[in-house]
Structure formats: structure tokens, C-alpha cells
Amino acid sequence: MGHKKKKQKNTQNPLINDILKVFADNPTQSFNYKQLASRLNISDSGNKQLLNVILTDLVSKGSLNELKRGKYQINPALVKFHGSAKSYITGVIDMKPTGKAFLISAEVGEDIVIAPNNTNRALNGDKVKVYIFPARKGRRTEGEVIEIIERAKTRFVGILQSSGKFAFLVPDNASMPVDIFIPKENLNGAKDGEKVMAEITDWPERAKNPFGNIIHILGKPGDNNVEMNSILAEYGFPLAFPEEVIKDAGKIPGTITEKEISSRRDFRNVVTITIDPEDAKDFDDALSILWLPNGNYEVGVHIADVSHYVKPSGPVDEEAYQRGTSVYLVDRVIPMLPENLSNELCSLSPHTDKLCFSAVFELNEKAEILNQWFGKTIINSSRRFNYEEAQSVIETGEGDYAKEVLKLNQLSTLLREERFKNGSIAFETTEVKFKLDEKGKPLSVYVREYKDSNKLIEDFMLLANRKVAEFIGANKKEAKTFVYRVHDEPNPEKLGTFTEFVSKLGYRMKTSSRKSTIDSFNKLLSDVTGKGEQNMIENLAIRTMAKAYYTTNNIGHYGLTFDFYTHFTSPIRRYPDLMVHRLLFDYLNKQPSANKELYEDKCKHSSNMEKLAADAERASVKYKQVEFLMDKVGQTFEGVISGVSKWGLFVELAENKCEGMVSLRNMEDDYYYLDEENYCVIGQRSGNTYKLGDKVNVIVKRADLSKKQLDFELVEE
């Protein structure tokens, strides 16, 4: 079957819209059917009769109020959403495993509830048009999908269940509410029980399930390689580079000519170091430090000059743009660039001449910026440190390049203190890491510690990103198109919910001003350090914040309290950084402003790919957490209640940060119900209360690898 993008039919009489528009354009007026007929230019008796029928129907549905016999006025609830009478809005579907969905739309201030029987074949992430039902007192606003404008995806990964003449793909993704019907002729060699990828080819009008075609056989479920590839495929990331891209990358010359060297500022005789994770294969950034005769310090932030090797619009560039980012799964990196570029040519490996794009700063003893310079450079890294080695130098004062590392750490500490003094929020997210055997099986789980060596690198990267953005964006004489990394203020409603939540855990937040909000966040994050609820509160605080994204329209970065911010420091693994390098180089060379519309589209794509990569990374962590606990069924662990719902308690294990659910159905000592306002469940007879943040002991009852799901049971006190 050919691929069809089917749009759902709108069977509603178009006259209804015209009628509602008249009323909503005049929300305080009332009309009888003659006045409406006049306004709508209806003169024939047939349509006048139809008009009367529609008015009666709209009253029965609550769209209109009948003030007195034959006199109608719009329901004020409709005006709230439609203002000028739109009874339709567009948005994106957020599908739940039950089949119920929510419409997320910029046109309204709240999500619209879509019942399962009103989704009309819409799937998670689809852009749709929804008809809004009249508001009912005390109920959330509901609607019905009447048109699918654009499918978010048509390819799904899952397990094939075959019965000979036909088969179904049972999707891995819980947000996909239906299985995909696969006719026998579309199996393409796939066998029962295999993990495969199917593409939806059609969804007949009266069919409950979409029809599909197997396009890729991934392999046997449970195999580590198959499962990691399944996660990549599910989120739309390719499993390999196209042959054309590999060939094109192979043709890129690695030799650095004398002419190229002479066009660059030479840092090869300045002490330069890299600090990265122990298992890193690509090194984006390096730091140099030079003691100046005037007593100040020259610190160079040197970034791999990917733009020298990857030219716009070639096969390598097009592939990098489509990927948008490297993807970091638990056991592997899926690079944005082919390995000969990411791990060799561009990577700032030690004792080798490397081309960079650099931000160079003169700082005094107080870490105040006195001068800055941006341009192309050549470096030769003196030493490759991993974070642990650099941390040892910081703590002991001894080791290779101790003088340089200690001074860089001292300056970075001052930069950090200044940033926090100016209102930056001190988020430190928990990163779960695994020790794996040669087959990818997790042997242990640990939380990566965030130490001074990590902060040292972060502080100088933040400095470079901020100063590059300021250099372009703060030029009031000439506004030029640029790629910014922005972060909006938190949504007041979300902030209010979070404030109420932490207050019930004994923490106070003041949110009357921007400064008091940021001060409160920093105090809260400090107060919860080392406590059982730390990880839960940090994660909820991050979710309360707006999401950072890429755009050409600068609004500043709320979380960092920077008026200008960009991503300049990781072009090997992030496409926006490569765009920033190209734009900065052009503007340093007096080129005119780039096409804003073109770059805004690229920014949106980059933001979307960043989100997909983060989702894929989380899915791989969840898979490994479940796999880690598979042989620990029956064992008891300490944990903290990290979430409550009408289905049960979510518990995060203290030892390894694995999260599972205690089902309320299995809490047999009482009938428990959800107290949503107080974030707890309460036993109806006993009054036993389990609330967010409570420490509990649980037994691992079940570890379902296919669903990436852990089931726990509370241990009696």
C-alpha cells in the first residue's frame, strides 16, 4: 500500500461556525433567528428552518444561552477560549497509555482534555485541529479532534505477534494506544516474537487499527544491542551513517598547511589542557593559561574548529543537521559527525596540532574581564586530564601542571561566585551511571559526583558562551541574526504549584519578585542537599522551569541570569554550536547579517532533536535500571516516595536511583485513596498516610524489561 497522509473529515455543518462567529464577535448582544438570518444573508426558507434547528442544538450543547424565548446569546465560557468565536484550536496531542489525550496549544492557557473516543486516530505528538466543547461548571475544558494536520511520526518499534495470515506490531512506546495491523505480504521476512520497526501505510476509515509494513528487523528482544538500537529507532535516530556521508568525510584532508597556520593566532607554546570524562573519545574544548607581564592572566577557551572541516550543504553537514546532536545512551555514543571527524580530525587530542575557534580573555586577580578576543587559532594540548585526575590536582595541589590547574580553578571559583551573586540558579542534576560487563549487562549503578574539576570546565564554557553572545547581540548599532540559547521565566501557575508542594514538605519559597524567586530556589536547593527528597525536589524544580531552547529571538537566559547566551563550545556534538561558529566567523569578517527566517527554522529543528535525544537517553537509563534489578526480585531496598497518583506510589531507591511503583491495589492492609492537594495517599480506615518525600522500604516484586517497568511492594514496618 502507498503511504497516505489521511486527514480526518470534518462532518460539521459550516453554518455552525458562521453562527458562532456572529455571537462571539458580539459577546454581550443577543439575537433572534431573523436577525441572524439577516447578518448571514440567509433569505430562503430552507436555510432559515435549518438555522432554527442549529440554534436549538447549540443551546442543548451549551454553546448558546436562550435568554428568553427566541433570543440567544453566546455562552461566556466559549468567549474565554475563542475570543472571536473560534470554536476550533490547533495544537499538539499528548497521548496517555489509556488512550486519553491532552491538547497542548499556545492558543489557550490550559491543556484541553480529549476523551479516547474523541481522538479520531490522532497519535502522540500529532499536530491537530480540535473542536472545543462548551465549558461545563467545575469540569476541565474538553474537545474532539476533527483534523490531523501533521503526523509526528509514522514509524514505530515493537514486538511482532504473528498468527500466520497476518500479524500485529505491539509498540514499545506506551504513548502509542493501538497495535499496528501487518498483512502477511508486508511482513518482509519478520518472524513472530522479533523486535521490528513498522511504518504505518494506511488507516482505513472504519478500521480500529492502522495498517503497516515491516521496514526493519532489529533482532531478538532482550539482546543489549537490539534494545539500544530499538531505542534509537523509536526516537528517529539512524543506526549508521549513509555510505555517501562516510565517503565524503573520508575525503576531508587532515593536513594543516603552513598557509592555514599563518592565518591563525598560534597558541602551541602556551600550556593548554583538556579535562573530560575518563571514557570520552571526542574532546571539544581545551583551556590555556598564560601569566602576563602586568600581573593578569590570559585564559583561552579553545573549541574544536569543526567549521573548518565541515562545509555548509555538503553530505556531512546535511547529515549532522538532520541528527542535530550526538546521542549518549548508557553504553554507547551515537555521534553527530562520522568518527574520523568526531574522534580524530576535530578532537583536541594531546601533543597534536589542532585547529580551534577560540575565545581569549584577560582576567585580573578578581577574575574580572579586562579584554577579550575571538578568532581562529592553532593549539597543541599539553595534557589530557580526566575529571578524577584534575580533581586530584585541585585537592592535593600536586601533579602535572598543578600551577595552571590550581590558578584556573581559583579563577573559575570567582566567576561562579559572581554568577550566583547576580542571581544564577544553582541547579546540579543527578546523573545516573552504570558499570557494564562486556555484553552490556549492568553490574552496578552509581550517581556521578559533580566536583570542582567539573565546575572549572563549566564556568569557563559559560563565560565563553555568554561573551560570544554578548559580542554579537549587544551591538545596538547593527542587529545581526544569531543563534541564542534562551530560557524564559517559569510559568506562574507551575511555580505556584511547586511552591505549594514544597511548603507541605516544610520548605518556604518567596516568589513576589524575580530576585526573591531565584534566592528561594537557591536556598531550597542548598537545604535539600543530602536529604532523601533531594533528587525528587531537584527534578521537580527543573520541571517547574521553562525549557531552554534555540532561537534567533533573544530573551535572555533566566536560570543563568544572562542577558545574552549561546552555545559555542561543543560543535562536535551539537549542530547549533556549528551554526554559531559560522555566523561568528562571518561577522568577524564584516559579512552581512544572515537570513533570520532560515536560521529560526534551523533553531526549531535543533531544539526538537535535542528533546528527542534527551528522551532516548532517559529510555536507555530506564532500561538498564530495570535490567539491573531483574536478578534482585525479592530483595528489600530503602527508598523515598518520589510521586503519587491514583494508581499508586512511585518510589526511588536510595542506593541506585531506580524508580518503580507500589500499586494501591496491592496495599491490602486498607483501602487507600489519593489526596491530590496534599501529595499523599491515605488509608480510609486506619488513616495511614504516605506522602511525597517519605522514606519507605520496598521489595522488588517484578522487573518487566519489555515495558521498562518496575513493580515494588511496601515492607510492613
Image (spheres, grey):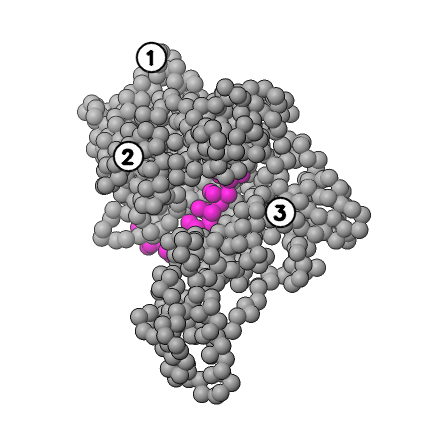
Q: Residue at x 68, y 41 (%)?
A: 159
Q: Earlier in the sequence, mark 3 or mark 1?
A: 3
Q: Residue at x 62, y 39 (%)?
A: 230
Residue that numbered label 3 is attached to: 156
CA–CA distance in space, label 3 to label 1: 54 Å
Residue furthest to the left in view is 294
Magenta highlight on residue 669: no
Residue 643 x %, y %: 46, 34
Q: Is residue 385 above or below residue 198?
A: above
Badge 3: how crowded within 10 Å, few (<14), some, or many (20+)? Answer: many
Give the residue type that dot 2 points to: Met
Nearest to the observer: residue 702 or residue 467: 702
Q: Would you identify the image quadrant in which residue 9 lies?
A: bottom right
Q: Quadrant of the N terminus?
A: bottom right
Badge 2: how crowded within 10 Å, few (<14), some, or many (20+)? Answer: many
> Marks 3 and 1: which is nearer the front?
3
Residue 276 x %, y %: 44, 26
Span colored in magenta: 588-616
Labelled pair 3, 2 in contact (Cβ < 8 Å): no
Residue that numbered label 1 is attached to: 397
Residue that numbered label 2 is attached to: 509
Give the residue type that dot 3 points to: Phe
Give the residue type that dot 1 points to: Gly
Q: What is the secondary structure assignment of the residue under circle 3?
A: strand
Q: Residue at x 23, y 34 (%)?
A: 422
| Horizontal side of residue 679 vs 526, given as left or right | right
